[in-house]
Structure formats: structure tokens, C-alpha cells
């Protein structure tokens, strides 16, 4: 499991602790109105976390760590071992010592979680959350009692395939390759379906995991899918976005031609806690401070991380994570770079604070949209 939170870091002189500031001023309301104060910037703590996390990942990418001994996932101290529990159980997390990239990536995420979640005022338990936030969390955590694990699903991070896996493990589907339209509710058990005592037991004793993705790449994927392919989203959200942000749109736009900058303007004006789940920040969906996840997988190494999880929970050997369909074209870094460079920089500066916890907690670097980078 993640190590115990460190002693809370002190806020800079004269500054509020991070948790209190976040509760007092939700990121979704940080944008200044006309004539108002300037946009709130991330705290010095958050900036330091981002820089440290991004630097380590850059070292991985450039192979600087190739000759270094892998960092331990958990500090080898007795107190932490007691907190995690030393009694062997199915699915106990153990990483291959030879996989230095995964070791370092998990260590970075553990450290950032400890630093941010250890701040005064940050939730330590789902029952520390306001009712609405707790409801969102419990509705996004799927339960498998047979293999004793909890999975917090994040839309646009392979959650449909994970739901297929859960249905195979429950005996509802014969295999993950069955061709049928995914029903995202039936034959699945959510924590929200259980009593409080049942929820607490599972949170304490089950293996808990989620998968994350570059926040802006996830937004681009949602934009392309929902506004380019799904009529329901075009009518429900697209038409309103065009009416609100496009001059001369008329009273009844179709909503099938929303531009990416228009979508970003819509996100700027939305409260993150009330967003559609496909673009709600992962922090609000899965509350990684209130729930101590045992593993945070990456979309960037989806198949390897997913199959590692299946090994940890001791799933049957014939159950594997579905391979990506040949026709599927995910949002690429090149496509993301193009869309970000095509958007007004001031607009990006307004959007990024909404997702700053996703960048920092999960060790994703902020995008480089300088004039030099965009002209390459």
C-alpha cells in the first residue's frame, strides 16, 4: 500500500495550508470574472511537486536511471510495514525488481500523494468528504468480492475494458472478446450499492487500484469521442456549448461541430465537482487522498500494468486484459500538441488549474506550449 502520510509540509510564510485553501476556494471557481482579481496560481508546494515529479519522469524517458539501482516502492521501516499489514493475503503487491521504470513511477506517485494528501484539511477517509463528493466516489468504485479488489473507474482510461474483465471474473461473460455493446451498469457492483459497514470493510481489506492518463490527453479523447461520434452528447452538451460560446450561433445549433477551444471555454466555466464524469478531474472521481489505493496504473503502459494487477489479485490465467482493437486510434501526443498549440494560451492558463491535482498527484508534466515548442 501507499506509505503513511508524511508529517504535513508547512505552507509558505503567510500562506494558507493547501487543503484549507482548496476547501475555501474550489478550483472550479478560481477563474476571475471581468474586472476581478487575476487567476489563482498553484501554491509553491504544488509547483515543487510538479517540478520534482516531472523531472523524475524525464530522467526515466532519457534513460538516465538505466544504471541506477531501482528505488524501493515502500520505505523499509517497521512502522510502515505494520501500517500496511504483514499478514500475507491474496494480491499482496510485489513488483519485479528489474522493472526500474515502474518502480520509480510508483515511488514518485507515492511521494506526491503523501506530500499533498498529508496537508491539513485534506480528506483522510471517504466519510471526511462532503455528501456530494462521497456519492461521486462510491458510484465510481467497482467491487469484486470473489477476488477481493476495488477498482475506481475513470472514463477515457480504458474503463470499458476493465468492466469487461470484471464481468468475466463474475461469470457474466465467457471472455473479454465477446462482441456486444457494453452496459456500464448491469451485472456490476458498486460501493454505493452497499451499506456503510460493508463499504468500510472492503476499503480496509481489499486491494484497491485505479488507472490514470495525461489529463489533457484524456480531455482530448473525451472531446473527440463525445462531440465527434455520440449524438446524445452533441445534443445535450454540444448545442449548449455552441450557443454559449459562438457568436451568431442561432437559437438551435446542432452541436456536432464544437471546436476544441469552445470545449475548453466550457470547462473553464464548469465546477469540477459537477462536471460530466468523462471530463471530471480524476481527483474528484476517485479521491486518492480519502482512499489509500494500493496501485495507480498508467494508460501509457496499460497492458503491462493491467496484467500485473490481474496477477496480483490472482485472477484465473485465462482472464487477460483485452487487447486494443486494430481500428482504435487513441489521442496521440502529436495530436494533443497540435490542439493545444491551436488554442489561445490564456485559455489554457484558465483550464490547467482545474486539473492541477491530476498533474501533480499522478506525476504528469505540464504541457509545453511555448511559442518555440509550438513552432517545431
Image: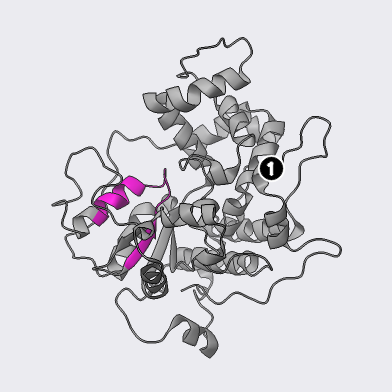
Q: Nearer the viewer, residue 259 or 308?
A: 259
Magenta segment: does it hold 283? Answer: no
Residue 172 located left or right of residue 355? left
**Residue 31 percent location from the top left of the image:** 72, 39
Q: How is the image coloured?
A: one colour
User: Compared to 148, does 344 lie above or below?
Assistant: above
- Crowding near the residue tagged with mark 1, few <14, some 14–19, many ≥20 C-alpha atoms within 10 Å: some
Residue 155 located left or right of residue 115? left
- Residue at 59% in and 25% down: 262
**Residue 365 percent location from the top left of the image:** 60, 50
- The magenta span reads 149-166
**Residue 98 percent location from the top left of the image:** 41, 71
Q: Which of 229 and 188 is in front in this view?
A: 188
Please give the residue where the numbered disc 1 appears in the rendered image: 29
SS assignment at label 1: helix
Q: Answer yes or no: is residue 247 visible.
A: yes
Residue 35 located left or right of residue 156? right
- Residue at 55% in and 64% down: 289
Amino acid at each position: 500500500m501507499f506509505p503513511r502520510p508524511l508529517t504535513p509540509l508547512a505552507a509558505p510564510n503567510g500562506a494558507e495550508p493547501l487543503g484549507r485553501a482548496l476547501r475555501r476556494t474550489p478550483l472550479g471557481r478560481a477563474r476571475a470574472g471581468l474586472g476581478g482579481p487575476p487567476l489563482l496560481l498553484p501554491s509553491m508546494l504544488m509547483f515543487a511537486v510538479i517540478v520534482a515529479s516531472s523531472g523524475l519522469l524525464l530522467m526515466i524517458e532519457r534513460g538516465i536511471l538505466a544504471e541506477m539501482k531501482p528505488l524501493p516502492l515502500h520505505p523499509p521501516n517497521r512502522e510502515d510495514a505494520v501500517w500496511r499489514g504483514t499478514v500475507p493475503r491474496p494480491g499482496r503487491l510485489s513488483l519485479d525488481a528489474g522493472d526500474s521504470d515502474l518502480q520509480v513511477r510508483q515511488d514518485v506517485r507515492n511521494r506526491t500523494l503523501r506530500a499533498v494528501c498529508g496537508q491539513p484539511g485534506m480528506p483522510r477517509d471517504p466519510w471526511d468528504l462532503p455528501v456530494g463528493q462521497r456519492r461521486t466516489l462510491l458510484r465510481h468504485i467497482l467491487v469484486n468480492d470473489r477476488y477481493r479488489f476495488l477498482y475506481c473507474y475513470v472514463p477515457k482510461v480504458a474503463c470499458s475494458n476493465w468492466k469487461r474483465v470484471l464481468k468475466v471474473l463474475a461469470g457474466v461473460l465467457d471472455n473479454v472478446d465477446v462482441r456486444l455493446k457494453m452496459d456500464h451498469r448491469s451485472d456490476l457492483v458498486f460501493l454505493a450499492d452497499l451499506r456503510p459497514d460493508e463499504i468500510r470493510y472492503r476499503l480496509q481489506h481489499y486491494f484497491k487500484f485505479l488507472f490514470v492518463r495525461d489529463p489533457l490527453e484524456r480531455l482530448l479523447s473525451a472531446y473527440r469521442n463525445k462531440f465527434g461520434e455520440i449524438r446524445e452528447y452533441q445534443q445535450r452538451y454540444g448545442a449548449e456549448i455552441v450557443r454559449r460560446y459562438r457568436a451568431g450561433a442561432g437559437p438551435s445549433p446542432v452541436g456536432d461541430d464544437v471546436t476544441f477551444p469552445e470545449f475548453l471555454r466550457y470547462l473553464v466555466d464548469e465546477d469540477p465537482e459537477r462536471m460530466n464524469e468523462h471530463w471530471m478531474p480524476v481527483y474528484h472521481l476517485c479521491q486518492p487522498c480519502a482512499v489509500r489505493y494500493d496501485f495507480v496504473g498508467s494508460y501509457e503502459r496499460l497492458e503491462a500494468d493491467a496484467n500485473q494487477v490481474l496477477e496480483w489479485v490472482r485472477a484465473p490465467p485465462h482472464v487477460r486484459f483485452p487487447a486494443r482493437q486494430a481500428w482504435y486510434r487513441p489521442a496521440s501526443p502529436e495530436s494533443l500538441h497540435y490542439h493545444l498549440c491551436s488554442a489561445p494560451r490564456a485559455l489554457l492558463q484558465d483550464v490547467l488549474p482545474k486539473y492541477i491535482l491530476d498533474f501533480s498527484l499522478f506525476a504528469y508534466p505540464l504541457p509545453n506550449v511555448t511559442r518555440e515548442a509550438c513552432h517545431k
